Amino acid sequence: MITDLPVYREQLRCNFAQLDDVFPDCMDEAVALLSEQGISDYLEGASLVCMIGRGFEPVLVYLEEMPEIARLLGESMLATVSQCVWKMSRSPNGNSILPFLQSLPEAARRLGSREQMQHYLDLVFDFMERTTGSIHGFHTTIPSPGLPDFLNQVPYLLNQLSLEGLKNWLEYGIRNYSDNPDRQRDFFSLQSADSRAMLQRERHGTLFADNERKLDLFLRGLWEDPEYLVPYSLAFDTLRKPMPYYDRLGIRVPDVYDDHAGIRGIDRYRAVLAHIAAHRRWTTAIIADNYSPFQRIAIELLEDSRVEALIMRRFPGMRRIFLALHPVPEESACDSAKESCIRHRLAMLSRAILDDRHPYRNEDVLEFVARFHELMQAGESSTTEMAALAVSFIARTRRQSDLLPNVRFEDTEVEYRD
């Protein structure tokens, strides 16, 4: 029994009679899942939803669903969602508020991170703004024909598509049917043939949301690592391709992986998780300011190679996956007269360390591959030893052309490395 229930009820500025029947149960869950500040934001958000004048049901959905959404994605979502509802209520699209709120629980479960949810919200409001009509071009007064239908389909769509796939499917429908209300409704309610065909085209790959438990067990069972897994989408960063990484919030992985180079999507996830878990177990911190930019790149690469060698000692089957996913740069592909070859040389070194059957003849690469394996034969080696080896490699192989602004990236990026 919550002793502060009257105080909480007073903070909720909403006078629907039905509220008194459900409020105690809602607060039981809120108190169990939210901080004191979170409870305050929760009641403030519910008060704002109540103010929009769309009846009791939107308030009820907010009160019932938001504590769990906040637990999954962070308490900042409490204010974010209420502000989204308020923004939608200031447009002609008030009829979409309830399906919008009802779409959020499944979206939170499938998307799995605050950043992913923000991308979803951005898609919803971009859709709303592009399909809400106007009279004589002055005021948006005609509600979006397809928005309610789309929101009703969101739970199904997110079980079929990655966020990138959803974005592409939406873009197709908006681009082709923004000025045809009937066909727009047919498309976004999945009634039309081209809607289903486009959905099928975008439905591919191994979705993180379908395999989260399996990957979590892989990380915990084989690596004794309980870190959270946090998905990101490849669809929204157009300047640079995001790569897996880990920070204080967890291990960041793509929300979908296609089969690639004969490796299943699920095994691409396993390669990423094994690589990051190995760093978390065996890599020690060094002071980056003590090294030049080129030296830091070389240290990162050789430390990546070291932890992968340790992975393959424990799990020999990972070698096949790493070999398939690691690029094989052609030795003569980089022209040092026109471009910086620093990354190209390091990628050759990395491949040669991994692959006993590598095709390279560069004497410096061969020497440092041998020195790497000599260090590893003595045991696990260390981050410090890799740093010393990297500094020696840069000193031996550095060219003036490495400073050229045009850096060769082709066949140098290893997708499963953080």
Image: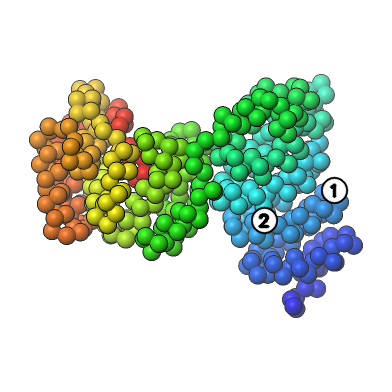
- Could you tell me the amino acid type at mark 1? Arg
Q: Name the residue under label 2.
A: 78
Identity of the residue drawn at 86% across and 49% down: 53
Residue at the extreme right: 17
Q: Do the residues labelled 1 and 2 touch (CB within 8 Å)?
A: no
Q: Nearer the viewer, residue 243 or 89?
A: 243
> Which disc is residue 181 wearing?
none
Q: Earlier in the sequence, mark 1 or mark 2?
A: 1
Residue 48 placed where, x, y %? 77, 54
Q: Determine whether 302 is above or below 65 in the image.
A: above
Residue 27 shows in the view? yes
Callout 2 amino acid: Leu
Residue 118 position by quadrant: top right
Colour scheme in the image?
Answer: rainbow
Q: What residue did someone put label 1 on?
A: 54
Q: Is mark 1 on a helix, strand or loop?
A: loop
Task: Please state the horizontal and vertical placement of residue 305, each as a whole percent of the image.
Answer: 24, 48
Label 2 secondary element: helix
In the picture, measured across the screen, residue 277 lies left or right of residue 139, that is: left
x 31%, y 38%: residue = 324
